[in-house]
Amino acid sequence: MRILHVITSLRTGGAEKLMVDLLPKLRELGNDVEILLFDGTITPFYDQLKSSGIQVNVLRVGGSVYNPANIFALRPYLKCFDIIHAHNTACQFYLAIAKKITGAKCEIITTEHSTSNRRRGHSFFKAVDSWMYHQYKKIICVSEIAAQNIRDYVGDSEIPIAVIPNGIDFKRFNCSDSDPIILTNFVNVHRAIMVAGFRYEKDHPTVIKAFSMLPADFHLFLVGDGARRSEYEGYVRELGCQGKIHFLGVRSDVPSLLKASDVVIMSSHREGLSLSNLEGMASGRPFVASDVDGLHEIVDGYGLLFPHEDAQALADIILKLSKDRVYAEQIATKCQERAKLFDVGLMALKYMNVYKEL
């Protein structure tokens, strides 16, 4: 099959990371696979995908991904592929419109990566979103709760959904070496890490506040970037903990950074099925997460959960892990066993079954 994945960009994010891992696997299964970006800004994910041999097509570099001209720019691609697979809101809307106005014969599907979004809080978007979702031959959801939320939102229990959890390259995160710079520069301290974009869905303030409550030898490394970074840097200064909280930006060596840490954290308001979550669980380090939709289902019974936005509870968990290494190792082992079930190779086979069905 000729398969095209369409996404807004290859900046930091779970959907973007999924493209880097999934598309080469789909090609290994005998398909002609390409990707189309609304914004072709060069990023580490962009370079990774190019180096893997995947053809990267670009509509433009920079600018708004909601530019209506993207609808017309999509039309030539509808003639060249058997399956076109959309990710992220702008791509979902504009691909649906382009398919409708052209009457192209390709099949279009989409992945819903989160359990909810801010549009669902506004009545205006409900009818628009319902129309958009019904244009797709199949909607892939990353969890059962994400699937149920869409059914409830559009008021249609029969809308065509397939649940396929996200996957990771388990071996890459499980077998990586520890980052030598972190180990050399931060000796005799307890090192924690959170890998997440600085955007609304993530809850960086809670983890920052938790570390302001911990002793001076507890350090936090924040990997990622985004619109709210300067806001969070200001919050760190406000709490007076600049010396123990480190902003590392976007990194391509996340596996070695995870290995150099003592604990991996995901503080969030909501998730679909977080790749950073699974990567952290695969790393061989204890994983701690907010008890919210999308994290609870994966972490409960394996890693550790703390109540949503409860900085004190998070600080208490981190302190306990630092004092009881046997307990920490037990949690890490259970996390690894859980992460093995979500290898990207298994996910690619499930995607292929959907494509073949269509």
Image (cartoon, rainbow, N blue to C red):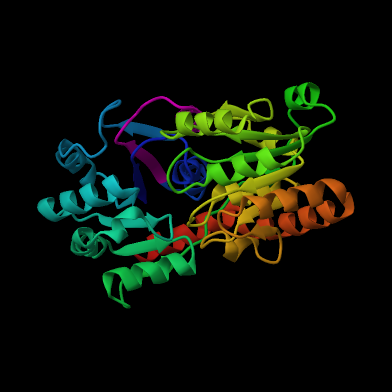
Rendering quarter of residue 290: bottom right
Relative to 145, is 254 above or below? Answer: above
Q: Is residue 44 magenta?
A: yes
Q: Position of residue 115 (x, y in %)?
A: 43, 61
* Residue drawn at the location 48% of the way across and 56% of the way down: 270
Q: Position of residue 216 (x, y in %)?
A: 76, 32
* Residue drawn at the location 44% of the way across and 35% of the way down: 228
Name the residue nearer the viewer: 119 or 159.
Answer: 119
* Residue drawn at the location 43% of the way across and 65% of the way down: 146
* Residue drawn at the location 53% of the way across and 57% of the way down: 347
Relative to 156, is 87 above or below? Answer: above
Name the residue nearer the viewer: 90 or 321.
Answer: 321
Question: What's the magenta region?
Answer: 32-52
Q: Position of residue 238 (x, y in %)?
A: 55, 31
Q: Position of residue 204 (x, y in %)?
A: 54, 42
- Indicate left or right for 96 with 53 as reference: left
Rendering quarter of residue 297: bottom right
Q: Is residue 81 magenta?
A: no
Name the residue nearer the viewer: 58 or 81.
Answer: 58
